[in-house]
Amino acid sequence: VLADKAAGWLFYIALGAAILTGIIWTAISGFNLSVIERVATVLVIACPHALGLAIPLVVANATKLGAKNGILVRDRLALEKVREVDTILFDKTGTLTKGSLGVVGYQTLPGEEPLLSLAIAAAVEGDSEHPISKAFQAAITDKNLTQPKTTNFQAIKGRGVSADTESNRYWVGGPRLLEMLELQLPQELKTFEQEASADGQSVVHLVQAALDGTHPSVQASFALSDVIRPESRKAIEELQARGIKVAIVTGDSEAVARSVAQKLGVETVFAQVLPENKDAMVAELQKKGEMIAMVGDGINDAPALTRADIGIAIGAGTDVAIESSGIILVKSDPMDVVKLLRLSELNYRKMIQNLIWAAGYNLLAIPLAAGVLAPFNIVLSPAVGALLMSLSTIIVAINSQLMNRVKL
């Protein structure tokens, strides 16, 4: 955009200066070879070779520098816009946290076998790609349990999963699942959920029903805990120090989201948000005039990543999330968001510097080429004009290469 504007200005300035030079010197001395020489010198000096290289060289070096620091730029316009971001929305699981959940506790109703419930929950989650599935698989491996065979697996968007055994249908999910099935937690499980949530743990429930899905009832609850990435706190502190608003958006419960937010020093939290609502939330913030960046890693984050002004995908995330973003953080490190901001600022700064070198020298060189100092016997020949043009190109190239020495 900057290059297009500068090229437009330079075109009209050069053309106008050349025409004006020809008219004035023709009026002074008549049309002769000297007039043609001065017009040619103006056009040679205004030749936008340096301008044509000013932006592409910066973009190429910024992309190279980003790759060295674990930042892959898929959309160069996204890189330019990052420096203007007002608000950054972070998905919680797998982004600010490691996404490696573990089953840290469970509670069943009286008469239910805890280990059997754990094995069934693991079986139901077996075909899911969500970190919760990995947590259950790790738990039954640790306890050397055998999970029953399941069929008809179904992922219920934003609510959980379901699958059938030989005799029953089961669901595993959180509060949104119970809301969908119109179920209330028994008191024993409600107490367990409250205690786990107070400790910042997520709770999912195992629901059993007949094979036709009738008569569902909650059988057990499981507490899962995620580990906050050690880099998350520092990253958020640096972003806030830059005046950028930071918010956490997650499908987890309010208590869990608040617990993580409190540890990270984040005040704005959007909890129990369904995937389609993440997209709508970004749109709502954009209506307020805010420039929004979304950082996420899952399939559920893809619509919001696409909707946001800048979509930033965690490298360890799903292919759908990566394809929906303009920037990819290969190392899955939240501090790379700070590096991305520094890269964007450096990218813009170098663009401005190059445009000044590429087009700014014309403010001095074009009048000289037009012959304003001819009465003092100071006249630029076309050869000298070509030399000045080449010099500006060299300076632009060197200035762009200096980007590679910067440590983000």
Image (spheres, rainbow, N blue to C red):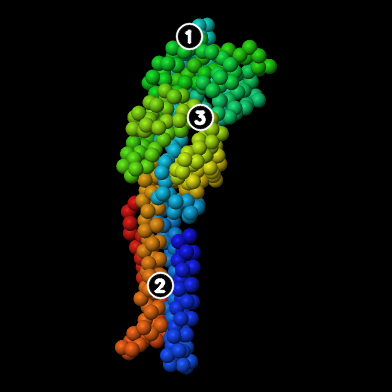
Q: Measure how far apart labels 2 and 1 are at the Cα level.
A: 75 Å
Note whether 225 is above or below 6 in the view shown: above
- Which one is nearer the viewer's eye here, 62 or 123? 62
Residue 54 appears in the figure: yes
Residue 357 pos. (x, y %): 37, 69
Residue 407 pos. (x, y %): 32, 54
- Give the amino acid type for the residue marked by disc 1 in the picture: Gln
> What residue would you read off at disc 3?
273
> What residue would you read off at disc 2?
393
Per the image, label 1 sits on a secondary structure element best described as helix
Residue 365 pos. (x, y %): 37, 78
For the point 43% across and 66% down, which residue is it? 54
Q: Classify 10 Å Cα crowding around label 2: few (below 14), some (14-19), many (20 and above).
A: many
Note whether 130 is above or below 121 in the view shown: below
> What residue would you read off at disc 1?
187
Per the image, label 3 sits on a secondary structure element best described as loop
For the point 51% across and 13% down, which residue is it? 185
Q: Earlier in the sequence, mark 2 or mark 1?
A: 1
Q: Are marks 1 and 3 in contact (CB under 8 Å)?
A: no
Farthest top residue in view: 111
Looking at the image, residue 58 sits to the left or right of residue 178; the answer is left
Q: Earlier in the sequence, mark 2 or mark 3?
A: 3
